[in-house]
Image (spheres, rainbow, N blue to C red):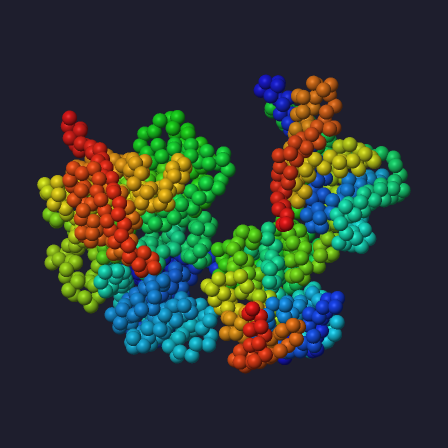
Amino acid sequence: MPIEVIFFIEVLAGGLLAGVMYALVALGFVLIYKASGVFNFAQGAMVFFAALTFVSLLALQWNFWLALLVTLAVMVVLGLVTERVVLRPLVNQPPITLFMATIGLTFVLEGLSQLIWGSQPHGLELGIPDVPMEWLSQRWNVNISQFDLFAAFVAGLLVAVLAVFFQKTRIGRALRAVADDHQAALAVGIPLQHIWAIVWAVAGFVALVAGLMWGVRNGVQYALTFVALKALPVLLIGGFESIPGAILGGLIIGATEKLAEVYVGPMFGGGIESWFAYVVALLFLLVRPEGLFGEKHIDRV
Amino acid sequence: MILSVEDVSLAFGGVKALSDVSFDVKEHEIRAIIGPNGAGKSSMLNVLNGVYRPQKGKIRFKEKVFSGMDPHAAAALGIARTFQNIALFKGMSVLDNIMTGRNQRMRCNFLQQAIWLGSAKREELEHRRAVEEIIDFLEIQHIRRTPVGRLPYGLQKCVELGRALAAEPRLLLLDEPMAGMNLEEKQDMCRFVLDVNDQFGTTIVLIEHDMGVVMDISNRVVVLDYGRKIADGTPEEVRKDQKVIDAYLGLAH
Amino acid sequence: MAIGTLDTFPKLLMHHAQARGARPAIREKDLGIWQTWTWREFADETRALACGLATEGVKRGDHVALVSDNRPRLYAMMCAVQCLGAVPVPLYQDAVAAEMAFPIQNAAITHAYAEDQEQVDKLLEIQPRCPTLRRIYYDDPRGLRHYPQKELLAYDALRDAGRASLKRDPAFLEGEIAKGSGEDTAAMLFTSGTTATPKGVALTHHALIDRATVAAKLEGLGERDVALAYLPPAWVGQFIFSLAQPFVTGYCICCPESPETVMMDMREIGPTYYFAPPRVLEALLTQVSIRMEDASRLKRWLYRRFMDVAGRVGGALLDGKPVGFFDRILYGLGDLLVYGPLRNVLGMSRVRVAYTAGEAIGPDLFKFYRSIGVNLKQLYGSTETSVFVCIQPDGQVKADTVGPAVPGVELKFTPQRELLIRSPGLFKEYYKNPQATQEAKDAEGWFHTGDAGYFDPDGHVKIIDRVKDVGQLADGTLFAPKYLENKLKFFPFVKEAVCFGQGKDRVCAFINMDMDAVANWAEKRNMPYSGYTDLASRDEVYDLVAGCVERVNADLAQDAELAASQIHRFLILHKELDPDDEELTRTRKVRRGFIAEKYAALLNALYSPARTARVTAQVRYEDGRTGTLSAELKIRDVKTFPPAAAKQAA
């Protein structure tokens, strides 16, 4: 294959795989937004908190799986507590109030994690090296990171698990019912608060998975909180209420920003990767304000 | 006697919606509550279902006395209902909508379901069967997988009835089940109501605005006007009652 | 158990229970799940039912009415009746009660089987007029719990009683089955009596088994095939496809969940053997077209592009004719993008053999299915012939013939062009109607079909009309008005057509345009018009219709027999033909004689050199008032073509 083509494939694959990582974060937003209409600004902080808790436990010489299990438990409890302490008292408040509350939560989580685990950045190692796949390099001369592929696989698995949970179980169905129509859900005796608690717990679980992947990629550090900001354009493109949208949105953002960096970046003297995603999202807003998969809301007058 | 309502009064601010209403419902009967617009029919149903808590009076259901319920508790006790303006999950399929009606009856906890193994799966299949029987009963096999939002109004009403039936209720509350339907749909709905009553032995309380078809299918009728009970008896008795005639004539401007 | 010669359906069933006991025999979707009876279960159920019926007093030679949609229990019941040497009489489940009275009286039916409350109600309603009817079995008990009638007995109760009796005396049933012979009547099917009283067509086991076997061999049907049973079981075709042929070959039939779910069920089952009358195929195509109109622009473009390709080469590929390499690639791509998904939506992905019959099928409709790779073929037959008389063999499929005779069938045409048939599949008799039997089946055993036609050069049978409607032009050549009218009506713009020519030197026609189609067409061209009469008189519309007539003429010129009946002139009528004005029958057949009289002036103008004709007609409005309508109608000459044979010679 000509070298240009190989290079293009490498950039595209790298972008798509980075997109998977964005999608992981966006997923947490979508879950909570769908079920309760809250834009949870603290999702980034939850990702950070999960990753930090896990590496700190590892640093204490804990067994890998035990640490994972305990972190999972912590994240679920965190989700439950958040729903109980922060959101339940604010039920029926305007969305902006809830949004502010989640911003507050962000700072609490950051402070809390530093208080407990210190502000030292940690490296995280899951045993999957971030090196090119040998098979692909030898056969096609294409370099794609093993870890990136692993992350994509994990993300795929997570989405599959969530899909089965949502489609095939009573609670999943109740979650969809609540997301569809709060009033109707109440009417058939679905306990809303119970469902919200579960959603927050699931979001905590998703945050853990995202935290692990991002932790390996960028190291576990305070800046992880800001991956939440990268999820924003993903959501604008995919729609706030759609899980497939979050994934596709992530892929689009990942691919375009990498391609732009490589092919368009030089014209601007490089460094456009950090802001190009927002430009794409803005363009999308102009064409399809409700996002790719978002629901069109027609307000009754 | 499965249900009795004793001296129930309900007011919103200064407006009295119900004043000292009493009536009872026998096991296995079809009981209609009729009355002109604003007579307090829907308020009455909402009291039974726990949406409103009356200021005064008692509700006796299956030998237990309540001064008020909440919807969740009512559902747990075996009271299911439909709504005048259809409260279905529009984005979900007919099957899923009816499945939500069985929420109360499913026991597996979050963890079991999260891993979707053994008991949770078995439970899901068992309930699926029960729901399929309802789908068969209502003859809506062809729309099983259709999102409810895409169905015509009459079928949505039917699906809502199905969701209420899925809870296998002791008492079924129907809020204007035939409102907005054409004649054929009304006949179908009547047939379903009678069949439910006959086949499952479900006690039914239904509200209707006009006297029409309900009179043919009800065993006994309560008539409300301005929040007060003005008549109570068999359809023939009620039809002849002067107060009822006046109330309805008074409405016909 | 030794079964001996397999000359009756019960013997075949018992044979399958031994030979392929664990294979699926019949499926039904119930409570959302496909439930299967294996051949062994099917046979067990049938045995129990047969013994139950015997204890209820059903004897050899009795007739048992069955009113049910396609369900495993119906077919088990039918075969149980046959086990005892009695005759199943399936009745149309959508018939009103009064229509059921005649068959029951005619065959002095004592036992009947009904699917549900609706059918039970009908039978009970006519019971006072049918005093012989003393037992009604029902399947679905819903709504029947409080019925006091002593005649009613549940299917389950019948079967359980039968099981008990079977246990006590297992030899009885074996003996009864063994007593059956191929010459016994296997079923009695009533022909729909739109014109006269219905006739009960008695068909023997031998006739049905013979025809079913021959046709199954021709198509290579075997136990792995699957068919969907969705048409009325009282219709001979469904009887053949869901009882006779599966019993002969061992294939599996599937019963849909409800009439509304047929499309979905078909998609799930993926039948390999399929039958549909033209109207069903047309309805399916309409659904596809509607969905395509709602599809995205890209999809519509793909659909149009690739349907063009399919129209060009799809039929040829299916017939195994040579097709250019590039077209093959294009068709392959189309199969991936359009035809495959389309077949999937239609539930025809696995169809190997599909038949259509019953009425003339439009060539465009027929070619559509073949072009997307569905092996749709025409067949010819009727209740009296156990269906299979002619079948189009693979590779010899034409839109306008029904194919050559199936092996075993002798065909000939009378000088009046009536098709006569001699076949092992012919019916035994019209029940209790020897006169009608004699009229239909002559002393030499030829069955007079009443259909007119002829052999085309390849030896295929071409049916053009009913004999009584076929006439002659002045020079004695064939004139088949209904054939011409049908050809015209296949165009969407033509709603009705009335062709004249009996005893004249050439054919002329009245055309009724299809208001919906033409109005739509006019709208797309921004053509203003004030109403039906105005639109019908437009030159543009005349051009449009003339195009259709011309295509019919070109087509007729290809056929030596019909080349003379090309349409020379036509006019478009100013109003729609209407049953209320007695111009159509209630079943919407044109009343040619009445129309010729009523519009004599128009007809005369067509056969004169006049360019226009004036019409004044009384019209009856919907509220019952009458008024007069007067209009000047244009007459248009149409291009005709020299006969193809002449062209070739030249």
Q: Quadrant for residue B175, please give it.
A: bottom right
Residue lying at the far left of the rendered structure? C475
Query: Residue at the spot x=26%, y=47% of the render?
Result: C630
Residue C363 in the image: above or below residue C255: above
Q: Quadrant for residue B232, please give it.
A: bottom right
The quarter of the rendered structure image containing the N terminus of chain B is bottom right
Where is residue A33 shown, x and y percent of the image?
A: 71, 46
Count of marks, rendered view:
0
Who is closer to the viewer here, C624 or C427?
Answer: C624
Query: Residue at the spot x=64%, y=48% of the render?
Result: A299
A1 with respect to C292 (left or right) = right
Q: Is residue C431 visible?
A: yes
Where is residue C327 shown, x and y percent of the image?
A: 38, 28
Residue B67 in the image: above or below residue A66: below
Query: Residue at the spot x=17%, y=62% of the render?
Result: C437
B7 with respect to C605 (left or right) = right
Where is residue C419 shown, x and y percent of the image?
A: 17, 50
Q: Is residue C390 visible?
A: no
Where is residue C594 shown, x and y percent of the image?
A: 20, 53
Query: Residue at the spot x=60%, y=62% of the render?
Result: B84
C593 with respect to B164 (left or right) = left
Who is closer to the viewer here, C501 or C425?
Answer: C501
A291 with respect to C262 (left or right) = right
Who is closer to the viewer here, A202 or C46?
Answer: A202
Who is closer to the viewer here, C109 or C309?
Answer: C309
The quarter of the rendered structure image containing the C terminus of chain B is bottom right
